[in-house]
Amino acid sequence: MTADQFFWVLARVTGLGSYAALAIALVTGIALRTAVFDWLGSNRAVRGLHEYTIVLWIPLAALHVVSLLLDTTARVGWLDVVVPFHSTYGTLAIGVGALSLDVLVLVTVAAYLKRRMSKNLWLWVHRMAYVAFALIFLHAVLSGTDFSDPAVSAITWGSAAALLTLAVARLLGGRLPA
Ligand code: HEM
């Protein structure tokens, strides 16, 4: 196996791992605040899993990006990682990945500044996590290698559909008090 092949496999595994962590973070986040799941709202394991996964995606996404930077075949540069649609190759696919990373960093930083922000502003920034996840899904569909594998797609499309259903239920069912 060449170095490029190794970095490519690492990028795929960490991309999928980070995606899975974010999917779990979203499901548990919805479960904590959705009237449909009020019986889960005060569950410690659900809160623990949410707090774990909102951090877990970070090292995995960092490794995903670093391995792509080291993989010379991928032709991804530092600016492509932070500036959406900067890349001349795979502009839309990679650009959506960069945009989702920017939005997620915003949501994550705001999560730690909760006490210094007005409740309303914090809530709206936090809700951007839904947008970020939709963008990551699009990014993975457009640029992924394993994402088109039937076994992987069954899980990823299935979990995305479940998340969409939960998000709609959350919208219709109302929000639990914080
Ligand atoms: C939170 C941020 C990110 C997550 C969760 C994420 C997740 C993923 C996932 C799940 C895949 C599909 C893996 C596969 O099917 O094999 C993927 C592929 C890819 N991502 Fe990301 N990504 C993120 C950010 C970025 C950024 C910022 C860039 C570059 C600017 C990027 C570039 C790529 C490329 C080039 C591929 C294709 C790899 C291949 O050849 O299979 N990603 N990403």
Image: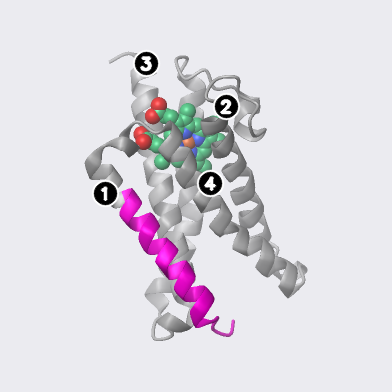
Q: Which residue is mark 1?
A: 154
**Residue 107 image point, x, y percent:** 63, 56
> Dots 2 and 4: beta carbons under 8 Å?
no
Write down the residue under mark 2: 91
Q: Quadrant of the N terminus?
A: top left
Amino acid carrying label 3: it is Ala
**Mark 3 vs mark 4: which is more N-terminal?**
3
Whether disc 2's CB lies below 8 Å from ligand 1 is answered: no
Q: Kindly state the secondary structure of the residue where label 2 is placed.
A: helix
Q: Quadrant of residue 46?
A: bottom left
Decide if residue 110 is on the left or right side of residue 69.
Answer: right
Residue bounds of the magenta highlight = 156-178
Disc 3 vs disc 4: which is toward the camera? 4
Name the disc covering residue 135, or none.
4
Give the residue type at disc 1.
Ala
Label 1, label 4: how many angstroms apart (C-alpha)? 19 Å
Q: For ligand 1, tell me if the residue under mark 4 lies within 8 Å.
A: no
Comes first in the chain, label 1 or label 2:
2
- Mark 1 to mark 2 CA distance (whole Å): 26 Å
Q: Nearer the viewer, residue 44 or 79?
A: 79
Q: Position of residue 48 (x, y in %)?
A: 43, 69
Circle 4 SS class: helix
Task: Look at label 4 and name its amino acid.
Answer: Leu
- Nearest to viewer (mark 3 / mark 2): 2
- For mark 1, does the 10 Å Cα neighbourhood hold few (<14), some (14 to 19), or many (20 or more) residues? few
Residue at mark 3: 3
Report, in whole angstroms, how far the alpha carbon at label 3 lies from the one at label 2: 25 Å
